[in-house]
Image (cartoon, rainbow, N blue to C red):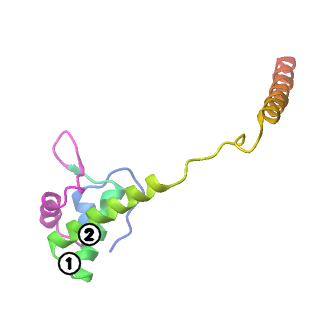
Amino acid sequence: MADLPEKLYYSIREVSEHTAVEPHVLRYWESEFPMLKPKRARSGARNYRKKDVDLIMEIQSLLHEEGYRIEGARKHLRERKKAKSTAKTKQKPQTSLFDSMDRDEKITRVRRELEEVMVLLKEMKAEE
């Protein structure tokens, strides 16, 4: 497998050479794996992104190394995507710096920071 150069889009030939998957197989996988959707140029040529190439490599691994059939590989990829999205929603929301402060502490903190901003603005104006 040749190294994939760093660029925005790759042709089907480049992807085929990098992944050792024939172009006709790549086109077939597009019909079988809905998540594999390379962009199309105005001419109709496929433009694969790095994430498409990574997905192709994963599909290849599932089919050829792990012994999945197409339907099983598709199901595996769907479940993995679903697990990732639920993991994102379970993350705790970011807490505010002010959450642990009472009202007076918050006011003092904001006032101090506003004073610092005023000093910076005065310095910037003096430099003009």
The boundaries of the magenta stretch are: 18-45
Which image quarter is the N terminus in? bottom left
Residue behind mark 1: 68
Q: Is residue 4 above or below residue 37?
A: below
Tell me the amino acid under the disc marked 1: Tyr
Q: Check disc 2: other Cα within 10 Å, few if <14, some if 14-19, many if 20+.
A: some
Q: At 21% from the left edge and 76% from the top edge, which residue is drawn?
A: 63
Q: Is residue 62 left or right of residue 88?
A: left
The one of 62 and 96 positioned closer to us in this rendering: 96
Which image quarter is the C terminus in? top right
Q: At 12% from the left edge and 62% from the top edge, which residue is drawn?
A: 28
Q: Write down the quadrant of residue 4 in the picture.
A: bottom left
Tag 2 and tag 1, C-beta contact below 8 Å? yes
How far apart are the two marked residues, 2 and 1, measured between alpha carbons? Answer: 9 Å
Q: At 30% from the left edge and 55% from the top edge, which residue is drawn?
A: 10
Tell me the amino acid under the disc marked 2: His
Residue behind mark 2: 76
Residue 40 drawn in magenta: yes
Residue 26 drawn in magenta: yes
Q: Nearer the viewer, mark 2 or mark 1?
A: 2
Q: Return the x and y of residue 61 as percentages of the image width and height.
A: 28, 76
Q: In this view, does 32 lie above or below 103?
A: below
Mark 2 lies on a secondary structure that is helix
Q: Is residue 19 above or below residue 78?
A: below
